[in-house]
Image (cartoon, rainbow, N blue to C red):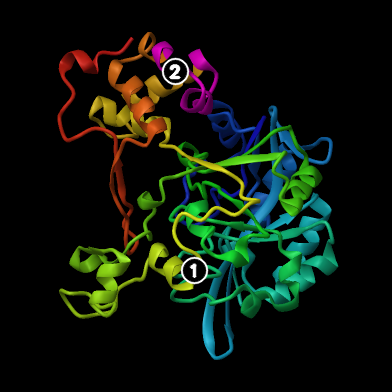
Amino acid sequence: MMIADLHIHSRYSRATSGEMIIPKIAEYAKLKGIGMVASADFTHPEWFKELRKYLKPGDGVYEYNGVKFVLNVEVNNIYTKKGKLRRLHNIIFAPDFTAAAKITEYLGRYGKLASDGRPILSLDTYDMFKALLDISPDSFLVPAHIWTPWFSLFGSNSGFDSIDDCLGDLQDQVFAMETGLSSDPAMNWRLSVLDKYSLISNSDAHSPTRMGREVNVFRDELNYFQLRDALKKKDREQFLYTIEFYPQEGKYHYDGHRKCDVRLSPKESRFNNNLCPVCSRSLTIGVLHRVESLADREEGFVPDNAIPYKNMIPLEEIIAEAMGVGRDTVGVKNEYRRLCSIFGSEFEILLNTPIEDLRNNTQERVAIGVDRTRRGDLIINPGYDGEFGTVKIFEEEKPTESQMSLF
């Protein structure tokens, strides 16, 4: 089995940790049980030098310290089409450094690549994709987090109402879409137009600890070309399932107006004419509302060729809530690493480790937290207008002193 996180960022992207360097990325990939990870940001000249320095070619893939890397970059396409400003994030995958360099040379005509690991390009997505296929037929493009309101294919504020409007006669050359943190596959299954695409899920991590919050699980160890083929064919025997953030925790799941502390369901927003009930300004329309507006199926529909999924909470969040402290505290980090060393990796703990084995090796509340997460027995408040939602395992009671003790 291979777990793949195909969308992260390097330290050269804005608002990204300085720890996002290849050795640290590989270290956390191993801790989490991720076998393949994105290189990210290959258009940035300094990061490209670091990629060339650290990554060694293998069998159709690059490697560092036993972790596989695929070359890719997320770009921010900003352009006007049919009289409307469009802002779309797209992920470009390249098979090797030679192709990546040629793609970078081309994209450099449309933006300042050294200013950000995720460059802003004055370039139509259609025109860019057409050029990419000419430069390297083995490259491919995945529209990123396709429902995010401000920067995505179906974004309520800057996207399109159809794939055809964006990609035209190239839409059949795209074979995968990224669902994003604020939506899960079930929400996307409500649009029949998405049935032919592989729906992938990735962390979009800006720090090592956030890697793996969404991933893709494949049956076999794959190289770049095998990965591309599995996605292209939507191969259910090879592409087993995705592991998902609870979409309600995404910062654009519900509608709302953060300045007024207003969070609304789509039904409540429609009742208020999509206006904030406090200040009467326009609400930021969230992912769930946007899905409902474009859906041609009822909630709960499952296509015949759907790739399954599982919802999970990151282990550090479970430990933190069990201990009643912040996720990034020393105690949480130490317990996280200790458990990973005992059981092999974070995903081994979240997916496979018997709860009784956890009880015998950590505090009771951590074991209970993993069990409740697997069962979906959680307390959820959806995110809205850039504000992350909350997914709670326990009620507001504080852990007792005996529950806080660690092994």
Q: Nearer the viewer, residue 381 or 66?
A: 381
**2 vs 1, front mark:** 1
Q: Is residue 283 left or right of residue 39?
A: left
Residue 349 shown in magenta: yes
Residue 120 position within the rendered picture, expressed as x and y whole percent measured from the top left: 57, 70
Graded by Cα atoms within 10 Å as few (under 14), some (14 to 19) or many (20 or more), the crowding at tag 1 reads some
Residue 189 position within the rendered picture, expressed as x and y whole percent measured from the top left: 54, 58
248 lies above or below 342: below
Graded by Cα atoms within 10 Å as few (under 14), some (14 to 19) or many (20 or more), the crowding at tag 2 reads some
Disc 2: which residue: 339
- Label 2 sits on a secondary structure element that is helix
Residue 259's image quarter? bottom left
- Label 1 sits on a secondary structure element that is loop
Q: Is residue 26 left or right of residue 297?
A: right
Q: Is residue 337 left or right of residue 51?
A: left
In the image, the segment drawn in magenta is 342-357
| Quadrant housing the C terminus | top left
242 lies above or below 399: below
87 lies above or below 142: below
Residue drawn at point x = 23 percent, y = 77 percent: 272
Residue drawn at point x = 81 percent, y = 46 percent: 225
3D distance between C-alphas at marks 2 and 1: 42 Å
- Residue 145 is at least partly visible in this image: yes
Q: Amino acid at mark 2?
A: Leu
Residue 57 position within the rendered picture, expressed as x and y whole percent measured from the top left: 81, 38
- Residue 20 is at least partly visible in this image: no
Residue drawn at point x = 27 percent, y = 80 percent: 273
Q: Which mark is residue 337?
A: none
Residue 204 shown in magenta: no
Disc 1: which residue: 295
Residue 23's image quarter? top right
Residue 102's image quarter? bottom right
